[in-house]
Amino acid sequence: MNVRRRLISTAATAAVTALGLTTLSACSGESAAAGTTGKFDVVASFYPLEFLAEQIGGNHVHVTNLTQPGQEPHDLEISARQTAQLQESDAVLYLKNLQPAVDDAVAQSEVKTKIDAGALTSLEKHGNEVGGHAASHDSSKNEELAGLDPHIWLDPVRYAQVAEGVGAAFEKADPAHAADYKKNTAALVKRLDALNTQFRNGLSGSRTKVFITTHAAFGYLAERYGLTEEAINGLDPESEPSAARVKDLEKMAKADGVTTVFYETLVSDKTAKTIAADAGLKTDVLDPIEGITSKSRGKDYFSVQEANLKALQTALGSK
């Protein structure tokens, strides 16, 4: 991939704050350098972890996001300035194996508190087809397995487990504010439990259980709610599908009553729209919530997840 090195500008981070990523006043949009804010300084590698840090930390934390709004997280390269921010922080919150540049920077840093979100829940290997569907007409046989699937935040249950682990790490690293971290974590987990119930109830009784996406980001969500995700590409959102895979998807869509090909906001929709047009299907957005932009159907994790639920309900015949 051709990746340009980008610095996180004050304007970009201010835009994130303006979009209201959290109702708490954790100052992710401030330009103050880590280590000089007078708060517990946390560097988060991308949006889902920034959101956790802000929700759990509240007024006691200053959060810096290494991935700017609109940037595909898998493509991140780290600037010298970001490396310095990381080095001066009190804690770093990242997801190992999602962003290799972050993994390298964290390994080389002397940050005392290093929190790997993936170690706080269970990860699985997922390929192009994930879920309970037999897929007897799918000949791909999960050829594009790319290791452990990192998209744990799209499953509210796993995301709640990560939140609990992050809360515990904050309590240990900043004991003066441990009581607030514990309270904020409990409130966040309660909201995630409610979101889980919304998905479970909202997707029960669907006409079909199969959905097609451009990128295999929704495997954990599919498994949680008894669905089957059929992905055009594997875990790499920018890989190109084979002609055989496209043929299989068109055959499967007809057999299983699939109505919609989902694409995402941070990656081109060209492949999804081409396949949908050839198969006589509709297209819609299913957001992997790797970043919040003006194209997002919501201002934060919860509102985008609720939009995802509505899109799935419409596509699967749940409403």
Image (cartoon, grey):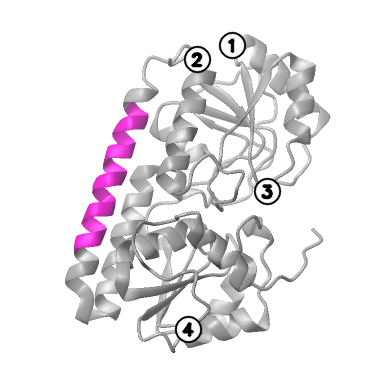
Q: Nearer the viewer's eye, disc 3 or disc 4?
A: 4
The residue that label 1 is drawn on is 257
User: Residue 66 is drawn in which quadrant?
Assistant: bottom right
Q: Which x, y percent locates residue 297?
A: 53, 39
* Residue type, numbered disc 4: Ala
Tell me if 15 is positioned left or right of 236 in this view: left
Q: Which is more toward the observer, 249 or 301? A: 301
Please tell me which of labels 3 and 2 falls first in the chain.
Answer: 2
The residue that label 2 is drawn on is 208
The range drawn in magenta is 183-200
- Relative vertical location of residue 209 with respect to residue 307 in this rendering, above or below: above
User: Residue 246 is drawn in which quadrant?
Assistant: top right
Q: Are marks 2 and 1 in contact (CB under 8 Å)?
A: yes
The residue that label 3 is drawn on is 236
Image disc number at residue 77 = none
* Residue type, numbered disc 3: Asp
* Residue type, numbered disc 2: Thr
Q: Which x, y percent locates residue 285?
A: 60, 33
CA–CA distance between discs 3 and 4? 32 Å
CA–CA distance between discs 3 and 1? 26 Å
Disc 2 crowd, CA 10 A, few/some/many (<14, 14-19, 20+): some
Tell me if 27 is positioned left or right of 245 in this view: left
